Image (cartoon, rainbow, N blue to C red):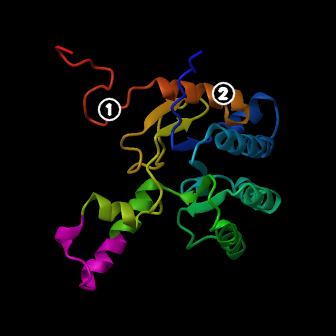
Amino acid sequence: MSRAPQRIVPQHVAIIMDGNGRWANARGLPRTFGHRKGVETVRDTVKAAREAGVAFLTLFAFSSENWRRPEAEVNELFGLLKAFIRRDLADLHKAAVRIRIIGDRVNLREDIRALLLEAEERTADNTGMTLVIAFNYGARDEIARAAARLAREVQAGRLDPCQIDAQKINDSLDTAGIPDPDLVIRTSGEERLSNFLLWQSAYAELMFVPDFWPDFTPAVFDAVLERFAARDRRFGGLSSKVVAVGS
């Protein structure tokens, strides 16, 4: 009996976790309840991604625009991040998950910076799935900081402007060493990238699901991966499904 063909799994999945507040509002609950429920979904999704064979999972945890939210909600998000790392870091480390943080850390509180650094350093040698947490992250800010790094290299005489190409920019981004996402998912029904991995998502498959993030179950994730496997990814070339004339 012939075996069914193995499903194509994206190497790198990136997720915009949207809809915590609306999930809570729909149930007559404070927005904070939605964020807490969303942390449970993070745990389930990390596990589901590992079991599916995803090598890199990037989660948009806190954007550089989220500072516009009420101070109490921002503090709640910071507290949930701290609680997640303190509670889950040991289990992630045991599962050989490596943690990478992307985003601007300059203006973060010292306790948050120390916690992020601890998570990275403790898991640095792990060889399982890489969990990338985008925290205080904005793609335009990331690209601007990369341009500033390259400009300083030129100013110091270590780099000729003619040497600046796509790879040099890649190597100057927060995601240096991380492959571009194959699949970007956004929950809650919104259909935009919202300043998330703009450079890196040039050839990513984009999928928008109606479920709010707290309702993004492993079954929903698996259904999205199934849709991805059916996509014909051409990268500007011809379809892999095209049959040559005369063959």
Reading the image, the residue beneath label 2 is 220
Q: Quadrant of the C terminus?
A: top left
> Residue 125 location in percent, x, y?
63, 67
Q: Residue furthest bottom?
A: 156
Q: Is residue 156 magenta?
A: yes
> Residue 89 location in percent, x, y?
76, 60
- First to last magenta residue range: 148-164
Taking 176 as reference, is 69 left or right?
A: right
Q: Is residue 81 visible?
A: no
Q: Is residue 197 above or below residue 20?
A: below
Residue 26 or residue 183, whichever sits in front: 183
| Mark closer to the chain start, 2 or 1 | 2
Quarter of the figure with residue 112: bottom right
Marks 2 & 1, CB-CB < 8 Å contact: no
Q: Amino acid at mark 1?
A: Arg
Q: Is residue 107 magenta?
A: no
Q: Quadrant of the N terminus?
A: top right
